[in-house]
Image (cartoon, rainbow, N blue to C red):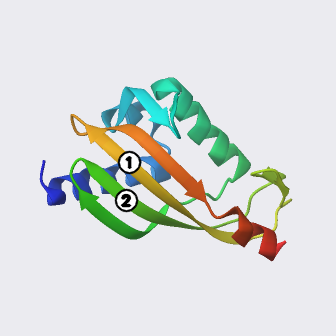
Amino acid sequence: MTKTRLSDIYRSYIDCLNKQDWPNLGQFVHDDVHYNGELIGLSGYREMLEGDFRAIPDLHFDIHLLICEPPLVASRLRFDCTPTGLLFGLHVNGKRVSFTENVFYEFEDERIEKVWSVIDKAAIEIQL
């Protein structure tokens, strides 16, 4: 897989998330996907994302930085959103916050097989 092809697949994946196009998530994510070292499977991954959108109705994944080195992708995602209630254990309660996520993906057969994610929780705490 070329860097350009991997970049295109990743951008389509992010578009899928932003559209909340859950029926097509399996086109981008393996059935046996791991998240931060834990096997959660496609259904667990989808449940996690659906929960994110319930907690953050205006959630939008904005690619700020993207590096592709097949089969790996490194991305810095930026968020500017208004979570309801709790977010990562913090009482945000409808306040608009901005934060980033540094996330790494490993692809197998053009689908995400492993995800490692670190969210900048400290940036949210500062805004509260």
Left or right position of 27 against 48: left
Q: Report the amino acid beneath label 1.
A: Tyr
Q: Position of residue 35 (x, y in %)?
A: 51, 37
Q: Which residue in the rendered view is the most extreme toward the left?
A: 2
Query: Please, is residue 29 above or below residue 87 in the view?
Result: above
Q: State the residue at coordinates (80%, 54%).
A: 84
Res. 18 mark: none
Q: Which residue is mark 1?
A: 105
Looking at the rendering, in which quadrant would you find the C terminus? bottom right
Q: Which residue is mark 2?
A: 74
Q: Position of residue 63 (x, y in %)?
A: 43, 66
Q: Report the amino acid beneath label 2.
A: Ala
Q: Position of residue 62 (x, y in %)?
A: 47, 66
Q: Earlier in the sequence, mark 1 or mark 2?
A: 2
Q: CA distance from mark 1 to mark 2?
A: 7 Å
Helix, strand or loop status at disc 1: strand
